[in-house]
Image (tube, rainbow, N blue to C red):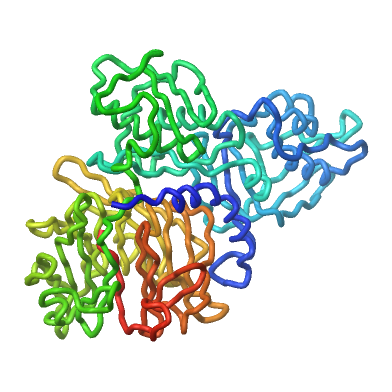
Amino acid sequence: MTRQRGPRRAAARVVLAGLVVAGLLTGCSTVPDSSPTVQITQVANPPETPVGIEPLPPERGATPEEMVRGFIDASASTARNHPVARQYLAQDAATSWSDSDGVTVIGASYSTRQTASGVVELSAPLVGTVDERGVFKVGDGGLFTRTFTLSDDSGQWRVTDPLDGLLMLQPDFARTYDAVNAYFLDPTGARVVPDPRYLVSGEAQPNALIERLIAGPSTAIAAGVANPLAKAALRSTVNLVGTTARVDLTFPEGTTAASLNGLCAQVVWSLDGLGFRSVELLRDGQPLGLPDVPEVQSVDDWAGLDPDTAPVDADGHYLVGGALHRVTDGGPAPGPAGAGAYGLTSAAVSADGRTGALGLTVGVATAGATVTLLAGPYGGDLVPVLTGGTFTAPTTAGTRAEVWTVRDGTEVVRLPAGGRPQTVNATTLGGLGRASTFQLSPDGVRAAVVIDTPEGGELYVGTVVRADDTVSVRDLRSVAPSVHQVVDVAWRNSGLLMLLAGDASTERTVPYTVGVDGWALTTVTMAGLPGQPTALAATPSRQPLVTADGTLWLLSGGNWVTLLRGEQPVAGTAPFYPL
């Protein structure tokens, strides 16, 4: 097994910087010329000592428009209770205004216009919302508008009706907040699952992050994960000793060793994202005393739960003339599938998470008007298991030996190894449209879905929920509403998607990355590609693969290169990675 901690942590820490990058993508019609507005609530108490650039108080004689703009600038302060921002408010408003109800993040290109004496209208691109737990919800690409009323009863204009919460410009938000992951457990207890949060920069972050873990996962994934910390409580503020965080918790009677192990993994992986290489967990001030668990822990002690672990030998595969081939040497895979016996148009292979051995193999084959789903062992015979009009390219997750696909655009089907096909409950899918792509996340908790709409393919992410014998996909939510014409999607890691989407201004398809919550849509280089990419494969700790002009290309060092460096491109389609 391999562990790739760096890329995952980097993705979490630079995601806010990606906002600025995304704002520069004005040449692409699939990305708005200005970012949408974000509503964000104060997700952690501001530090006692202000950080960054502090705003100026109101100037005497300032106009109503200047007062509104000054209030917005002052809302980006990290000072507790925002005393400077309150100076822009009328006396009653300064007393009643709540700065903890949320933050609305707007594009820096906002405008203000005085429509009447003491009335100022603000208009700005809406980026999204972040609630009091630090959970981001992407905006729909529309405009945020707000009318402010001001009074000059005191001899100076002052705002009388401020919006509760903070109204913050996108660059200020990126400067003030950090993106971090709170980790929960997948239903099998085999992986920690990232749940992105946005916390005010400063010393309060460790404490705030532990409180968010105890409060539980975001609504979107709550039904798909477990939270061993749910009934715990912090006994005192997280104590920092160098790079070690000391966390003193109390638990209810009857808390099992299994629960303690799970919450240890949660805490250690979460705090590791803040730069703490070790964690000392205490129970009511005393060591936990768990067998085989050191008093001072690190992610190395919980490497088996790495959200981005990938089997060492799970090399990429692709199709050539309906035959299954390997990326490593370009040669055919073993067995009839490698010999082209089935005329496959897409395929997937599951891999044993412990040994890396390749197992359940599923392929799609077309014969006239009939499309057949075939299944069998890797290297062995594949037999028909299901027919239909269409099947999406099969997909696997790293936590279970099963393969998923969508039949006829709306029926989600899962095929367990050695079992029969089972329909997955996905009642909201049909109302959105037909699914052309369906890809499980490495931990199996999320599903990325491309749904065909009149404007082209749109990207959604849903949550896989397992309850007793019922499996469902719930809470499908748009994560890149500004992007249309999506043709393919894959998981770069457990918290980051890679997609191919049309750029109407250049009439070509280009690659992007975006967080699972829709934050930080960013373009990926096209350097080295002979043409526009049409298919995509990605997985943790592996180089992304695309098909362009009927040939395969790897992303390496900021450029797309041939499979065998220095040699001619290899023909191939429908690339994928076993998982």
Q: Is residue 203 left or right of residue 387?
A: right
Q: In this view, does 213 lie to the left or right of 94?
A: left
Nearer to the camera, 261 or 23: 261
In the rendered image, the vertical position of residue 411 relative to residue 278, given as above or below: below
Nearer to the camera, 140 or 311: 311
For the C terminus, which image quadrant? bottom left
- Residue 134 percent across, percent down from the top left: 51, 38
Which residue lies at the image location 48% right of the left edge and 17% below the top edge?
236
In the rendered image, the vertical position of residue 75 relative to residue 330, given as above or below: above
Q: Can you see residue 290?
A: yes
Based on the displayed image, in which of its 4 quarters is residue 268 positioned?
A: top left
In the rendered image, the vertical position of residue 280 relative to residue 338, given as above or below: above
Based on the displayed image, in which of its 4 quarters is residue 96 positioned?
A: top right
- Residue 350 percent across, percent down from the top left: 20, 60
Q: In this view, does 244 lie to the left or right of 256?
A: right
- Number of marks in the rendered image: 0
Q: Can you see residue 224?
A: no
Based on the displayed image, in which of its 4 quarters is residue 498 positioned?
A: bottom left
- Residue 149 percent across, percent down from the top left: 76, 39
Nearer to the camera, 344 or 356: 356
Which residue lies at the image location 33% right of the left edge and 30% below the top edge?
263
- Residue 527 percent across, percent down from the top left: 52, 76
